[in-house]
Image (spheres, rainbow, N blue to C red):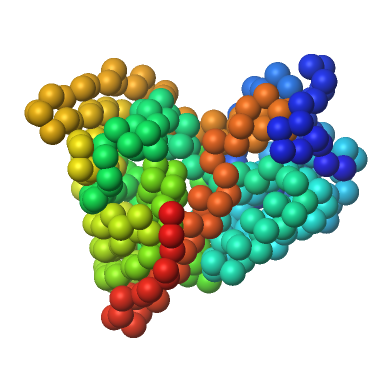
Amino acid sequence: MAAPTCGEAMSPESTVKCAVVGAGWWGTTAHIPAIKSHPRAELVAVQKRDPGAARQVARDFEVPVACTTMDEVLAVDGLQAVVISSTPNVHYPQAQAALEAGCHVLIEKPMTITVAQAEELVTLADNRGLQFLISCPWHYTDHNTEARRLIRDNRLGRIKMISVLMTNFTDGLYRGLPWEEAIEGAQADESGPQPYLKPGRVSYCDPSVAGGGQIYCQVSHVAAHLAYLTGAEPAEVFARFDNGGTAVDVYNVLNIRLGNGAVVGLTSTGATMKSERTYEVRVYGTEGMLFLDLWKGTFELHGLDGQITGYPPLAPDGIYPDRAPATNLIDTVLGVSRNHSPASLGLTAMRVIEAACQSAASGQNIILGGTG
């Protein structure tokens, strides 16, 4: 069933047969359009639990097979790659089944509910020689690629401190509000045309479905991004949460020490004002500092001598390349690109998330002992 693995190139005329599991809001917004537009991909199946909804998505996106279960998806002849874009509570069993069937996998963030689940999936993919990606569009921007290169090439010297402020218009989702009410007045893409499918009312507000609130939904981005930039694992995590009157966390403050000795201050909320969302990352080293403003698409490198190197701002469609993860899945299976966002980054993010939840619940600093 599986296509060539670990960079083994396929013939130039080969295509990759893909399925999207959990073809809901984000699946139909990002992953299905990415696969449909790729010249060497075939979207052969979509899955939703409701049979009528599955048939409707398949019909509207011209997909030959509509499925309601994972078993039906994996029974599709010649299937090679699966995108898991369902709710977090079913990521683990669905990804496990796809990997065990020999399929390459792109999994949405948060990767799983627990670290143990994430570790098992990464090990399974490694043992099977399968491509396994975490869906984090930030890892595909030109600015983040360059920032990662500068850090890994020691242009900043030894990394000592990282400051992150990340906010988004997600508070209404944590409160179970209808989509229109949740994003009403938000100055962002979400306030534009209505999506093909809207998020389920419990997809973000029920901890048994989502895992948590902001820590699972948005800090999963940040924690994976920190690992992407630095290559370091968390060694200690101390966290405080505020639920803002909901069943899940809305405000998060984390202090993290990385295995390379750097200290991280991470603040995040889904209850930002509707006028602006923020994702600012400042990385301080002994030889310089870099400043990424991810939602604005700007990037600066500051030297110790006061010189500032400004990089050209990103085009609007390059700020959050939501189709890049699925495109990269196909390209890695074809052997024409490397995996730009390996699932190991999602595993590192889960270590931060789980430790932060433990710390917030206990009031204690959580020691992980990560290195890197």
Q: On screen, 347 above or below 108?
A: below
- Percent position of residue 358, x then y: 39, 76
Name the one closer to the observer, 192 or 94. 94
| Residue drawn where x is 80% and y is 25% of the image | 10
Image point (51%, 46%), residue name: 198
User: Quadrant location of the N terminus?
Assistant: top right
Residue 43 in sight from this viewpoint: no
Residue 61 falls in image quadrant: top right
Q: Residue 346: image x %, image y %? A: 52, 53
Relative image position of residue 357 (x, y in whole percent)? 39, 72
The one nearer the camera, 292 or 41, is 292
What is the number of callouts on the image? 0
Quadrant the C terminus occupies: bottom left
- 162 in relation to 112, above or below: above
Task: Identify the residue at horizontal 54%, vertical 31% (top origin).
Answer: 324
Q: Residue furthest left?
A: 306
Relative to 350, residue 76 above or below: above
- Looking at this view, name the residue that lies furthest to the bottom: 362
The residue at 54%/41% (across/down) is 341
